[in-house]
Image (tube, grey):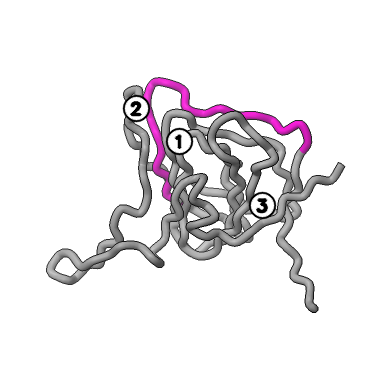
Amino acid sequence: MNRTLRIEPLTRDAFAPFGDVIALDGARHFPINGGTTERFHDLATIDVNDAGGRPLVNILRGQPRTLPFEVAMMERHPLGSQAFIPLGIVRYLVVVAPAGPFDERQLRAFSIEGREGVNYARGVWHHPLIALDAVADFLVIDRGGLQPNCDEIELAQPYRLAFEEVVAT
């Protein structure tokens, strides 16, 4: 059986059930430091402090993947959020499902191009990093602590990622 998950463009509204879009467009901003710097303020809800957690700042280097790509597993972080912010202009995909018991009927896939990042809310199911086209570095803010904070599941059957085809009328 070939199950296809259509990739849609990332928007704040479409991604809201899964966390935050980290982007300058539409963000609250104001000048600081005597007007020499523009501050884009409070771009994501970083949630890592429960159960003795602390914020970790990491850099991940994603190897490029090619399409078609099969999603065969998902993961979640039940004790904290996880933010991915590209350190350059990149193209990548995110695959998500709502927090709670995993429900494959609610899987969504988003395409991101440029400098936009995402912050997965606590417990949101997501696929590990899917960089496209080239090696890509990401600043990642997530939770550190003594308790394990990653659950993984294998899908009974994989989903194939595919971009929506535009049909001319």
Residue 156 drawn above or below residue 46: above
Task: Identify the image quadrant of residue 47.
Answer: top left
Say which quadrant the N terminus sits in.
top right
Q: Residue furthest bottom?
A: 169
**Circle on res. 65:** 3
- Dot 3 falls on a residue whose secondary structure is strand
Q: Label 2 belongs to which residue?
A: 50
Q: Secondary structure at mark 2?
A: helix
Q: Circles 2 and 3: CB distance less than 8 Å? A: no
Closest to the camera, between mark 3 and mark 1, is 1
Q: Tag 1 or tag 3, which sits nearer the N-term?
A: 3
Read off the magenta span: 138-157
Circle 3: residue type: Arg
The disc placed on residue 122 is 1
Q: Residue 98: within the magenta?
A: no
Number of numbered discs: 3
Q: Residue at x 32, y 31 (%)?
A: 49
Tell me which numbered mark, 2 or 1, is placed earlier along the sequence: 2
Magenta region, mostly helix, strand or loop?
strand
Badge 2 local density, few (<14 within 10 Å), some, or many (20+)?
few
Q: What's under tag 1, amino acid-wise?
A: Arg
Q: Of label 2 and label 3, which has the lower sequence position? A: 2
Marks 2/1: CA distance?
11 Å
- Residue name at image x 20 percent, y 68 percent: 31
For the residue marked with disc 2, what is the amino acid?
Asp
